[in-house]
Image: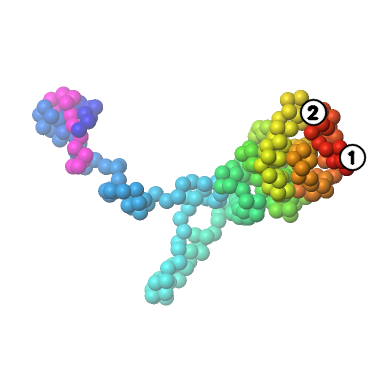
Amino acid sequence: MAPYIKKCSECGGINLIMNKDKGEVICRDCGLVIEEKMIDFSQEWREFDHDEGDKKRRTGSPMTYTKFDRGLGTDVGQRGDVYQLQSKERNKYFRLRKWQHRISTAIERNLKLALAELKRVASYLKLPGSVEEEAARVYTMAVQRGLVRGRSMESVVAGALYAACRRHEIPRTLDELSEASGIDKKEIGRTYRFITRELGIRILPSNPIDYIPRFASALKLNADTQTKAVEILEKAQKIELTSGRGPTGIAAASLYVAALINNEKRTQREVADIAGVTEVTIRNRYKELLRELDLKGEIKKKDLED
């Protein structure tokens, strides 16, 4: 037994032991029971394997921002044997359920509706749980600061999701968020800039390389073309060619060039539709890449004329 740091009131000795089974602190020198009926904070069950321990634990799920009560609330569930109760007891049970589902504050009511919408949009965009959790945290902070007042709930949800995607380096364009939420992309952009500025959230510019795998998969390009596109982008970043240009446009143009080099030709219209930019943007970025990186020698003459 580990020594218990305290003095004995009878003999003044410090040679004490704690008996956890009996909940007592005893002096070894004189045998005086100094404390008894101590609370045991350890688990009250034994477990012989991991599965058995999981079955006996009753601590519940962890706290999460994706629920308006942070996952700490309780729920009066529906049980089949409630109808076996007498009428008075049954009515009391249903009354408890009704009051339990009522939300007291305006913030909680807003969060309950907004987090359901956030979950729907995140599911539509196939975003991981970490991004959904971060977006819920950003939205909760915005509600608590009063930043939602005067703005639509859906636009703030979309702005929080866009901020979370940027922080986790999971590329999603404003066009995709606009399609998923039904909010104009300009409104989403304005709301995103507003909440990040007011909440002091620092987000680095998007890296064009993050868009390459998604665009390549949508265009059905092979791994060699994807690797070549990344090489082109890395060279462009070294000479600061990507500065001041939209990440989706420069990423799509690099894929277009890489596809031409590897004889997997795709039209500018196909690439523009996948990236959500115009053909003019693809054409301008394409010409800049050829000129600045001297890639004309790697592309066939016929493709250059096209």
Residue that carries the numbered disc 2 in the rendered image: 293
125 and 105: which is toward the camera:
125
Q: Which residue is mark 1?
A: 305
Q: What secondary structure prevails in the magenta region?
A: loop
Residue 242 in the image, given as x and y percentages of width and height: 77, 31
Instruction: Point out residue 210 in the picture as x, y percentages from the top left corner.
Output: 67, 38
Image point 65% across, 34% down: which residue? 201
Q: With 114 as the anchor, is 27 left or right in this view?
A: left
Q: Amino acid at mark 2?
A: Leu
Quadrant of the frame with the C terminus: top right
Instruction: Establish if 73 lies above or below 22.
Output: below
Q: Is label 2 in contact with label 1 (beta carbons under 8 Å)? A: no
Boundaries of the magenta span: 9-23
Q: Could you tell me which secondary element the residue under label 2 belongs to?
A: helix
Q: Whole-percent x and y of residue 97?
A: 48, 64
Looking at marks 2 and 1 on the same chain, the residue that comes earlier in the sequence is marked by 2
Q: Which disc is residue 109 wearing? A: none
Q: On the picture, is 275 further left or further right than 76?
A: right
Rendered position, 235 above or below 175? above
- Identify the secondary structure beneath mark 1: helix
